[in-house]
Amino acid sequence: MSRQKTVPVRGVGVQIKQLYCRFRPDTASDPSTIYGQGVLDVTHLTTGRWTVSFNEAALRCLAIIPGVEVSTSSNDYAITCTPSNEGTTTPLSIVVTNNVGGTPTDIASHTQNWISLVVVVEESSAAV
């Protein structure tokens, strides 16, 4: 008996794609080093929070996979992500929060400190 994968049915012409963002936190300032695909900007919002803005609108998040690399720390970092403007004519943005012990905490500027996101999106027919 063969195993088959069930693939969700999507509308004709709907594309699923992956966006990527990697930035170096700069304590309480906007990051000056940003890499990514489809990324417009990354800004420091409040303590421990950054807004990642993407170029495209009409996107709906299927998955957000965050990661954090910190040079020397014994803290346990937990990254959470909250998308906004999904499926609208406004470009997608994601608020990234770094929590240490349940408290939003900035990450110091260091060449080995990075936050990264892999975002799987699909075009939303509602806004296209």
Image: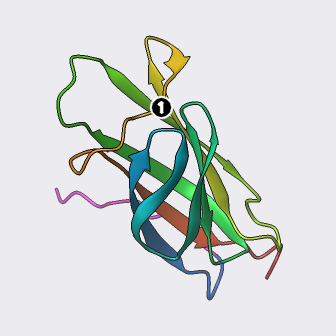
Q: Is residue 26 above or below residue 9?
A: above
**Residue located 54% across and 47% down the image:** 29
Q: Residue at x 31, y 41 (%)?
A: 68
**SS at circle 1:** loop
Image quarter (top left, top right, bottom left or bottom right) of the N terminus: bottom left
The scheme the figure's colours follow is: rainbow
Quadrant in the picture for the C terminus: bottom right
| Quadrant of res 97 | top right
Q: Is residue 76 left or right of residue 73?
A: right
Residue 63 appears in the picture as rendered:
yes
Q: Which residues are magenta?
A: 1-10
Q: How far across and how far down the image is residue 42, in percent?
A: 56, 59
- What residue is drawn where x is 48% and y is 62%? 120
Q: Is residue 33 found left or right of 123 in the rendered image?
A: left
| Left or right, residue 57 beside residue 26 | right
Between 22 and 65, the one lying in front of the other is 22
Viewer-closest of 87 and 99:
99
* Residue 97 counted in the magenta span: no
Task: Judge the density around disc 1: few (<14), some (14-19), many (≥20) Cα neighbours within 10 Å.
Answer: many
Relative height, residue 69 to residue 52 (above, below): above
What's the amino acid at mark 1?
A: Asp
Q: Which residue is mark 1?
A: 106
Please identify the quarter of the rendering in which residue 28 is found.
top right
User: Residue 95: x, y in percent?
Assistant: 62, 45
The kind of secondary structure the magenta stretch mainly shows is loop
